Amino acid sequence: MNVKHYSAAEDDIPYMGLHIEWRGAHTTLGEHAILFFALPGVGNVGKVAIEGINTSHICHEIARLHHTALPPLATLDEDGLLAPPHLTLSSIESVTGKRVLSLTGTSQPLEPEQQGTMAREILQWLESQGVKSLYVLAGLMDAPTRKEVFVVASNAAHRIDLESSGVDVRRDEPRSGAIGLAALIASIGPLFNINSACAIATTVGSSGDVFASQRLLEALDGWFDLGIALPSDIQTKLTEKLAALAPEKVENLVGELTESPDAFYM
C-alpha cells in the first residue's frame, strides 16, 4: 500500500502532536456528506455503529491520524504489521450513493489537557480538509424500556436547522454533561466552522449493545437519507461480533439477543 505522510507543522497548525498518514493513493478527504466519529464508550454504541457501517458497505481506509497524546500501545494491523496508536479515517459508499466518512479508534489520551489538545488539532485539520458536518455517535445509559435516539447540538443555528428538518433534538440531555475526547470533538466544532453534534442512543450500558447501534443508524438514516442502516442479516452480524467478544458463548448469546433486545448483556 502506498503511504504518504503529513505533519501538522506543514500547514502552520500551532499544535505539533498530530501526524497524518495517508493510505493508498489518497491525499485529501474529497467530497462527502457527513463525518461520523466514535470511540469505545457506554455500551460501545457509537463504536459498534461505525464498525457496522464500515463492514456492511464498500469501505476504504483513507488515512490514519497519529497523535503523541495517545497511549503508547502499538498493535498488529490487518496486514500483520506493527502499527503505532492511531485513529482510522475511512470512506463509506452508501446505497444511496452518498459518501460518508468515519473516524474511530480504540483509545484516547488519558490526561484532560492532552484530550483538549488532540481535539483541537483534529478539528483544525478537518476544517482544512473541508469538513462541514460532524456527528459523534454515542450511548447514554438508561432503563431497558427506554429506546430513544436523539441529537444534542453545539451551535444554536445548527440546532434550528436540525429541528426544522424533523430531527429529534434535545435541550435537556445529557443532564450531567459529557466528558472525554469525543465530548470535546462534539462541542468545540463550531470554533472551527464545523457543525458538530452528538447523536445518542439510549442503552442498558452493556459492553456491546448492537441493538442500540442499529437504532442509532436507522434514526440517522431516516433524518439524513444516507443509506447506512445495517443490513437485514443482523443475526449473522451479531454472531461475528459476539465471536470476537465472547467466543465460548456465541450461539446462546445470539439466541437471547434475537428473542429479547432488552437482555443485551455481555
Image (cartoon, grey):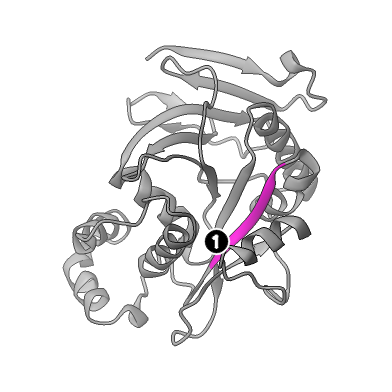
Which quarter of the image is occupied by the N terminus? top left
Magenta stretch, main secondary structure, is strand
Is 260 placed above or below 249 here?
Answer: below
Identified at 48% across, 55% down, the residue is 224
Is 11 placed above or below 120 here?
Answer: above
Q: Which residue is mark 1?
A: 138
Identified at 55% across, 75% down, the residue is 141
The furthest residue to the front? 164
Residue 123 locus on image (x, y percent) = 70, 37
Query: Which three-letter amino acid code belongs to the residue tagged 1?
Result: Ala
Residue 156 locus on image (x, y percent) = 77, 60
Q: Which residues are magenta?
A: 194-200
Q: Name the foreground residue: 96 vs 49.
A: 96
Q: Is residue 49 left or right of residue 134?
A: left
Q: Name the foreground residue: 98 vs 37.
A: 98
Which quarter of the image is occupied by the C terminus? bottom left
